[in-house]
Image (cartoon, rainbow, N blue to C red):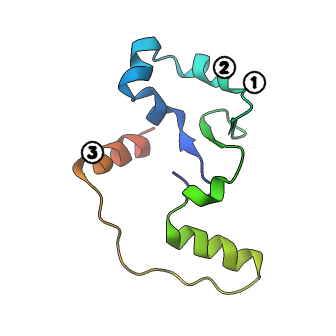
Amino acid sequence: MDSDGYVPLITIVGFPKVQLLTNDIALISRILQNSKEVELDATGLKVRTKRNWERWLPSSQTAQLEAAEQNEKPQIDKAEPQMSRSQRRLAAQCQNF
């Protein structure tokens, strides 16, 4: 997930139940364009919920967003979040996208 709450569609395509339906990112993007629940970014390659997307940001990103809205200097959490092996693998796949 990026700082604007978007998740790459390549991540969604990696879900086993989605793979049973399709692995066509262009098709998924076209279908999601008409969704009432999610929105695509300008490229059509990332998706996020339309309502309250900020709630899904990691706490350090939420704090930075709130600080930016208040024109304050953001407090950055120095601690590295711990990721599971599957999360690290998914992150590596997203970086290659």
Q: What residue type is labelled 1?
A: Asn
Percent x, y for residue 54? 64, 59
Quadrant hosting residue 94: top left
Q: Which residue matches tag 2?
A: 31
In the picture, measured across the screen, residue 43 lies left or right of residue 82, that is right
Q: Identify the residue shown where x is 36% and y is 40%.
A: 93
In percent of the image, x 44 and y 21: which residue is there? 18
Q: Name the residue under label 3.
A: 86
Q: Quadrant of residue 13?
A: top left
Name the residue at 23% across, 50% down: 85
Pointers 2 and 1 in contact (CB under 8 A)? Answer: yes
Q: Is mark 2 on a helix, strand or loop?
A: helix
Helix or strand or loop: what does disc 1 sit on?
loop
Crowding at mark 2 (Cα within 10 Å: few <14, some 14-19, many 20+): few
Q: Which residue, given by chain and number where applicable, does mark 1 sit on?
A: 34
Which quadrant holds the C terminus?
top left
Can you say whether 36 is above or below 49 in the image? above
Measured Cα–Cα span from mark 2 to mark 1: 6 Å
- Name the side, left or right, on which 10 lies relative to 33: left
Vertical placement of residue 85 versus 30, above or below: below
Above or below for 61 versus 85: below
Q: Which residue is drawn at 51% across and 70% down?
A: 59
Inspect the image, locate mark 2, and give the three-letter code of the amino acid beneath it: Ile
